[in-house]
Amino acid sequence: MTDHSAFVAALRRLDAAAKLVDIPEETYVRLRHPKAVLTVSVPLRRDDGSLEMFTAHRVHHNDLRGPGKGGLRYHPDVTLDECKALAFWMTCKCAVMDLPYGGAKGGIAVDPKSLSQLELERLSRGLIRRIAEFIGPQLDIPAPDVYTNERIMGWMMDEYAHVVRRHEPAVITGKPLGLGGSQGRSDATARGGYVCIAKLAEERGWKPAETTVAIQGFGNAGQGIARLLAEDGYRIVAVSDSSGAIVSRDGFDVPSLIRAKNDTRKLEAVYCQGSVCDQVDAERISNGELLELDVDILIPAALEDVITADNAAEVQARVVLELANGPVTSDADDILDQRGITVIPDILANAGGVTVSYYEWVQNRSGDYWSAEDVRQRLEKRMAYQFDQVMRLAADNQVSLRVAAYALALQRLGEAAEAVGTRDLFNGKD
Ligand code: NAD
């Protein structure tokens, strides 16, 4: 019987990586079991006085290397299984970046666009009251993810302070600057991906003006990478959001595109409500067609499972930068590999966000706040270093960047497992 669980599918990524590293088998066994899961019902008093209940989950996948770290997502499709998969990726991502964190993730099954801003605030505060004992600066530190943003993180931090009766900014990252957020957090995910592209461009001798880019998803991650690449002269020829995609062979003027998308946001709304498709004069295509465009770089920056065994053979891009978590399914990996398409895997490509979240947590705990330039330099240095580690492992072992990134994560998790004691130690063989 085929198991369609997202968590089981995510674990498949470990199989090839485990062959490359000499780690205690029990590290690998432990990763197959999330440490703890919490499911809660969050009551929401709607503006019309009615009461509605929403299901939310929070998963601690592994905390061997440090407290859990991972986003909170608001989306109708949020399930416990998806949270387990995303938490597993966080464990691996934090290990790849050598951050002192384990992996966690959570979310509410809700369509946030159907809520007023006051309802959104009540729901976010209600969630924190339900999960307050499951999170904490040394336990599990949430952050923004799909359809959550810095304002929501600010409400959550404020509610947590009410619950625990003390100021505790390090409980959550991705906060507004005025509430202890870090400089450079808002475009950190994009900047991390940008460093990966810049390193690859250097190695392959790409000229930005001759390099075309298609981006799926035009939110925090998608807009950020579009802006950074366009500033370097790359040609952003296609973008999309949940309503559809647009393409312009000459390349878009990205600042106007961002303005057009964001101007349609109602002032009182937290979310971008406009669709890029209604704002800019360009040819409309579907989100599926965007993935199959003949471009140099394809950047999925929306949701998971968009490149699958069904469409991987149609992907024309030379490089896929996984800015979203899990956009390529494990059964599409081999197809892209065989076709010579380089995939920069999510656990490396989008790790800029968690890296600056870590910097935010460090600043909150020390009370010493850094400049934007300082944050940027630290991020770029760490990304470039870990990118080189993954590239070297891949070249030495003739494996994909994904297998190499998982191998690096396993190696670091294995070191931690050995340090606390494994079968060999307790059998007196160490
Ligand atoms: P966001 O909510 O800011 O933006 C999501 C974008 O995706 C929106 O433009 C939305 O319209 C679009 N979208 C939704 N459904 C779509 C669909 N079916 N087709 C095309 N576009 C669609 O979210 P974000 O923070 O930019 O996150 C995007 C991805 O990046 C997610 O996979 C998230 O897990 C990952 N990520 C984000 C961060 C971060 O710091 N924000 C860090 C690491 C990874």
Image: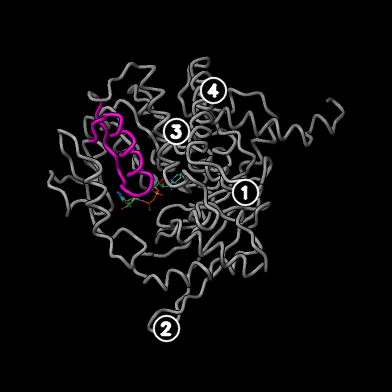
Residue drawn at the location 57% of the way across and 42% of the way down: 359
Q: Position of residue 55 (x, y in %)?
A: 50, 67
Q: Which amino acid does label 2 sit on?
A: Ser
Q: In this view, does 4 lie above or below 176?
A: above
Label 2 and label 1: CA atoms lie apart by 35 Å
The residue at which mark 3 appears reads as: 345
Is the residue marked 1 within 8 Å of ligand 1, measured from its CB?
no
Q: Which mark identifies residue 389?
A: 4
Label 1 and label 3: CA atoms lie apart by 21 Å
Looking at the image, the residue that sits furthest to the right is: 428
Q: In this view, does 233 lie to the left or right of 103?
A: left
Q: Where is residue 132 in the image (x, y as percent from the top left)?
A: 62, 64
Q: In which quarter of the image is the C terminus?
A: top right
Q: Do we see residue 110 in this rendering?
A: yes
Q: Give the range drawn in magenta.
A: 211-236
Of the two numbered discs 2 and 4 in the rendering, the one whose residue sits closer to the viewer: 4
Helix, strand or loop at mark 3: loop
The residue at which mark 2 appears reads as: 50
Of the two numbered discs 3 and 4 in the rendering, the one whose residue sits closer to the viewer: 4
Between 64 and 226, the one lying in front of the other is 226
Q: Where is residue 411 in the image (x, y as percent from the top left)?
A: 63, 28
Q: Is residue 285 left or right of residue 358?
A: left
* Disc on the earlier residue, 2 or 3: 2
Q: What residue type is labelled 1?
A: Gly
* Disc on the earlier residue, 2 or 4: 2
* Disc on the earlier residue, 3 or 4: 3
Find out whether residue 380 is within the magenta segment: no
Q: Count residues near mark 1 (Cα–Cα under 10 Å), then give few for <14, some for 14-19, many for 20+.
A: many
